Amino acid sequence: ADALAGLLARPFRPGNLFADAADARVNCSAEREDVLAAAAAAARQVFAANYTHEGFWADHWSYDLDQVVSFEAVFPDDVERALWDADPLPFYMSAGTVQPRDFKYVEVEGLGVRQYNSVYDDPEKLGQLADRNTRPDGAFELAVGAGGDLTANATTVYRVAPVAKLVLLFVTKFTLLDPSGLGIEMDANKPGWNDAMNGLPGLLGSGMPETCETWRVGAWLRKTVKRVGRPVVVPAELAALVANATAALDDDALDALAYWEAVAAAREAYRARVRLFFSGDEVALAADELVAFLDKANA
């Protein structure tokens, strides 16, 4: 009994549970299905994933809004509850970190400016993710504790409302518009999921399909936030990025390149702040404030 309790005291997958039980010479008199049903009933589900690639595809988020719109089509009266009042969502800790421009933008003799080595396996993240048995990726502790204490014992699993995730998605994609203001930059080693385009990130490529999807997210958020009329509570780091992007949008003195530089610098500052942790501080973006930002961004 003690050996089985030890196995159940840490995260498990069904196959691993029975394999570890066999290794520990634990013999269960009940059927496996009954053991698993009892263990699952008392357990908490944790979504886990493992980053094993050399970059991030530019379009692997573009179907997120489709799921929300499909839900809205079936349960139109339940959108507010599902996005504002449902159980908050955690964040996934990826071992990959996107390099800033001053590292990945390089001049290659005979070719000109290129974008290489945009993503690296972050050793600090890898160290934090090393013990998968006790800290599966899907439940990693992403907010520092009170007083900004960065020690592992002071952290908590940080979660936000689903609507805050959609705001974060829109803002981080909007701030990736290229200097022409047309395409979403392929800034993380990968294009959209089309292997024929794998060379485009090195050529500082950007994608119009991702821009269209970003516009869709912004338009849906504007309509929904205006209708619901409630604030959206977001991480303080994201609120700062919204403020910086708004300031750049409002600055008529900026030409296209200067605007891109201001927004890209704000995006890189945001990434640096949340590379390992969110602070845990939050800001409530008023509905009219968020709608005004979305109007400017989607204009």
Image: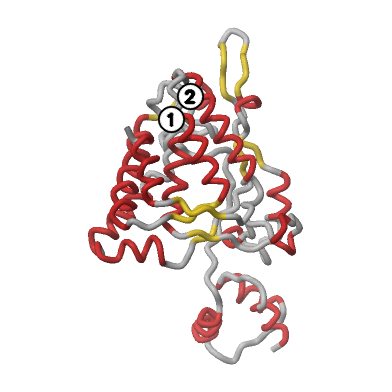
- Residue linked to disc 1: 249
185 with respect to 267 (left or right): left
Percent from the top left, x then y, of residue 181?
A: 40, 25
- Residue situated in front as seen by the camera: 18 or 51: 51
The answer to whether residue 54 is above or below residue 109 is: below
Percent from the top left, x then y, of residue 175?
A: 47, 34
Quadrant in the picture for residue 207? top left
Provide the secondary structure element on which disc 1 rests. helix
The answer to whether residue 252 is above or below residue 126 is: above
Q: In which quarter of the image is the N terminus?
A: bottom right
112 with respect to 173 (left or right): right
The kind of residue tagged 2 is: Tyr
- Residue situated in front as seen by the camera: 140 or 241: 241
Q: Which of marks 2 and 1 is nearer the N terminus?
A: 1
The furthest residue to the bottom:
29
Percent from the top left, x then y, of residue 67?
A: 33, 55
- Residue linked to disc 2: 259
The kind of residue tagged 1 is: Leu
